[in-house]
Amino acid sequence: MAGSRPPVRPIPISRRVLLSAFLTLLSLFSIVSFLSSSSSSSSDRSSSPPADHRPHRRSFLSLPSDPLLSRVDLLRRHASGHHALASAYASHSLRLKLDHSRLLRQFTDLQLSLSALLPRLDPDSIPDEDSLRPLEKEAKDRIKIARQLVSESKESFDTQLKIHKLQDTVLSARDQLIRAHRLRTLSGSIAAASTPKSLHCLALRLLSHPLAPKTLAPIPNLSAFFDPDAYHLAIFSNNVIAVAVVVASAAKNAVDSRRLVFHVVTDRMYLPAMRVWFKLRPPPGHARIEIRSLTDFSLGRQDLDLFTLRFYLPAMYPELRRIVLLEDDVVVQRDLADLWRVDLEGRVNGAVEMCFGGFRRFDRYLNFSHPVVAERFSPRACAWSFGVNVFDLDAWRREHCTDRFQEYQSLNEDGILWKPEAVLPAGLMTFYMTTTPLDKSWHVMGLGYNPSVNLEEIHNAAVIHFNGNMKPWLDVAMNQYKQLWTKYVDTEMEFLPLCNFGL
């Protein structure tokens, strides 16, 4: 048929070609499958730790979706946190020493109850809702009690903590104050015991004076200084300017200075300096003065010093019946003649007592654990002070006070009765029951350590005493009192400006 298309004949495909195509597809599929499984296995191994190293605790992301287990876990965490809080408060109570307080008991009970509750909140031991409900109620009640108790106790604990911090601060400040006080006492003792440059300079200049070699000769007509009608005063010191002030103040304030006789004793090294001073600057008002060294007295002992020499006054001055002993750190402000007329009631010593209340009694100065002290003395006996002392030398000889002092001195060789460097305890023991109290206006003490001495008492005092470490000739002297001493310093003495005395 004209114009008709010829019929399409199928292309014949051989079996060999079909088989080849099938095998190729199968190979591709196998390769893809193998690669896919290998990648998945590698990814699993890299994202998951080995079974032996996997943590036993489940992370937040791996929590089971079971709401029962979630509630149990939440309760357990809350109970555990409040248990730790109760334990901390209980421990804090013990540290604050509230052992018997209500709060400590409550926190301890709460801690124990929460400790007992925690093992019961194990998810494996709670199978269903009915088992959880009573535990949940119990846990919430205890947690609520814990919160209320912490809320109520916080202010109290904070207050106690502040109190303890304040106490610690106070104790620390007190320790620092004690250390500072000890350091100040030590420094003051060193300053008081040492010789300032100005005093050393003065002594050297006096020793280099042309008159110094002539002063070593014995005093001519020594008996003239033992007039029984005169007022005799003893001063034991190596301090030239201090002795000069005592002598000048006593002579200037005496009604009749011609009756005053000063008996000064010093170490032999300072004897020329002391004599040169009073040769150049004699005592005011025709008062008399005799100056001797410690070695000028034959007392039968070689171990005496200026501190212990006072216990040998009757042997030093056998011609005298009464004498007034003055320390070198005093200033006389009034006539002392009445001291030679004071009735001592047959006793040896007249002195101003310094005890008040429970302070400054014998138990402060003596070791009452020693049997000799405990048997012979009363710990409540009132202490008196050296500085201004009136001694009846006849009564002294009668009572054998020097022998008594030597006995106590030998017992105190090891410092077991009193501190060896102190002289007052020896006086308290030696003149026990033989001391008559003087009126307090005769002797006002404390100007060498107390900045608050009553000004009226100072004004009315016959003698003021710079006892303590702040001596008026030192740089550490208290300014409010220093002028009471410096006004009696003889500023016309040519050596004082050369030795830089800060007057």
Image (cartoon, rainbow, N blue to C red):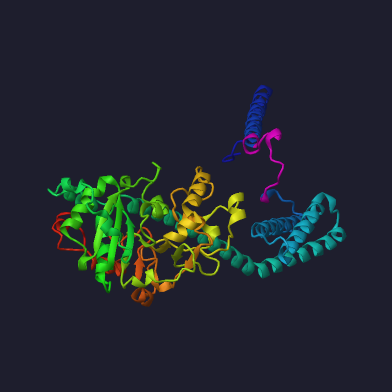
Q: Position of residue 91 (x, y in %)?
A: 67, 56
Q: Is residue 58 magenta?
A: yes
Name which residue lies at 74% across and 51% down.
64
Name which residue lies at 58% across and 53% down.
373
Left/right of residue 439 with respect to residue 67 in the rendered view = left
Q: Quadrant of the C terminus?
A: bottom left
Q: Position of residue 457 (x, y in %)?
A: 38, 75
Q: Which residues are magenta?
A: 44-60
Is 125 located above or below residue 45 in the figure?
A: below
Residue 338 visible in the picture: yes
Residue 452 visible in the picture: no
The image quarter containing residue 440 is bottom left
Q: Position of residue 201 (x, y in %)?
A: 20, 50
Q: Quadrant of the N terminus?
A: top right
- Residue most toward the top? 16
Number of dots carrying numbers: 0
Is 288 located above or below residue 6 in the figure?
A: below
Q: Position of residue 122 (x, y in %)?
A: 80, 51
- Residue most toward the right? 130
Q: Is residue 412 magenta?
A: no
Front-lying residue, 112 or 44: 112
Left/right of residue 464 with respect to residue 31 in the rendered view = left
Name which residue lies at 49% across and 50% down.
403
Is 195 located above or below residue 254 in the figure?
A: above
Name which residue lies at 72% across and 42% down.
56
Is 39 located above or below residue 93 in the figure?
A: above
Front-lying residue, 354 or 119: 354
The image quarter containing residue 501 is bottom left
